[in-house]
Image (cartoon, rainbow, N blue to C red):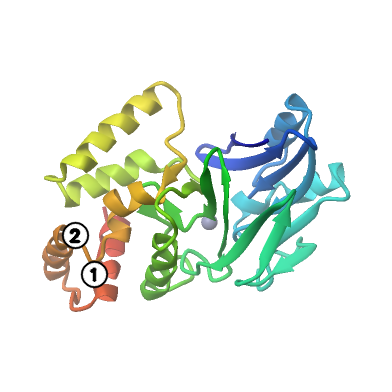
Amino acid sequence: MFNIRAISAFSDNYIWCLSDSASGKALIVDPGQAQPVLDHLARHQLSLDTILVTHHHPDHTGGIAALTDAFPEVRVTGPADSPFKGLTNPVHPGGEVVWQGLTFQVMAVPGHTLDHIAFYTSTPVDDRPVLFCGDTLFVCGCGRLFEGKPEQMKQSLHSLRDLPDATAVYCAHEYTLANLRFARSWLPDDAELAAFEQDCIARRERGEATVPSTIATEKALNPFLRWDDPAVIEAATRYASNAGLPCDSDNAIFAAIRHGKDHF
Ligand SMILES: [Zn+2]
């Protein structure tokens, strides 16, 4: 039986641990720190055999050297074109990663960084397909564009938007409440968004994570997946006109939303 648990790291990172109770093996996604992972593995009596890396940023890779010291056989899988040099199993978009009978598709999702990839499996874990998307798609937000262009990020998010609605979205940060404050400022009349914000505030007050989300929730609520939604187009048009930005295409609308969040 497979299980996915969050390991908290730094102030707001989630390192995801996918484990298989039959074999006692664990797969870890984006270990920016080693110690919380080592503690988690010991507590649950798991043996690490695979690390997935979505992109090169240190808060996603900083723990890998210490984890490979502790588990010398570990397979470190990540983007072949990454500036991060600690991979033992470089993969290309369109490729696959097989772990304990689960097959993950490797998806290119550049924008936050140029090497960014996501891992998706249609085989249900806890009854739903699984997406590990790093810093590309967040709950009601998306990653900042450190390396890529808005149109690249929009294309990346489009490919994630096309995944099945039930897909669980395991992103790498707890940024939800800040993302919702921005989304609500653009879409103050969106009742579904307002209700979701109240729900997320309550979950955070109980000390619970708001991640994972689902593709269905993100399609309905996340402004960065709604560049073709009339309410978002209206808000983007108003913002772009005030900011002196173009707003004459899907790409320009997406760029205006990202610009709005960057300057919020
Ligand atoms: Zn990052």
Q: Determine whether, in the image, residue 32 is placed left or right of residue 41.
A: left
Residue visible at 18% across and 47% down? 185
Residue receiving disc 2: 232
Residue visible at 42% across and 74% down? 152
**In the rendered structure, which amino acid carries the disc numbered 1?**
Ile
Residue visible at 19% across and 59% down? 232
**Does residue 158 lie above or below 39 as drawn?**
below
Query: Which structural element holds mark 2?
Result: helix
Residue sitting at the far right: 72
Q: Which mark is residue 253?
A: 1
Q: Which mark is residue 208?
A: none
Other residues around mark 2 within 10 Å, as few (<14) / some (14–19) / many (≥20): many
Q: Residue 184, how many percent across, how many down?
A: 21, 45
**Does residue 253 lie above or below 225 as drawn?**
below
Which image quadrant: the N terminus? top right
Residue visible at 22% across and 77% down? 249
Q: Determine whether, in the image, residue 179 is placed left or right of residue 115.
A: left
Marks 2/1 in contact by CB < 8 Å: the verdict is: yes
- The mark total stands at 2
Q: Determine whether, in the image, residue 56 is placed left or right of residue 229.
A: right
Q: Residue 114, how many percent across, how many down?
A: 54, 71
Query: Which structural element holds mark 1?
Result: helix
Please tell me in which quadrant of the rendered image residue 178 appears: top left
Name the one closer to the observer, 219 or 31.
Answer: 219
Other residues around mark 1 within 10 Å, as few (<14) / some (14–19) / many (≥20): many
**In the rendered structure, which amino acid carries the disc numbered 2?**
Val
Q: Earlier in the sequence, mark 2 or mark 1?
A: 2
**Does residue 188 lie above or below 103 as drawn?**
above
Q: Residue 32, how many percent across, how many down?
A: 64, 47
Mark 1 and ligand 1: say if the CB distance to the nearest ligand atom is below 8 Å: no
Q: Residue 231, how many percent across, how many down?
A: 14, 58
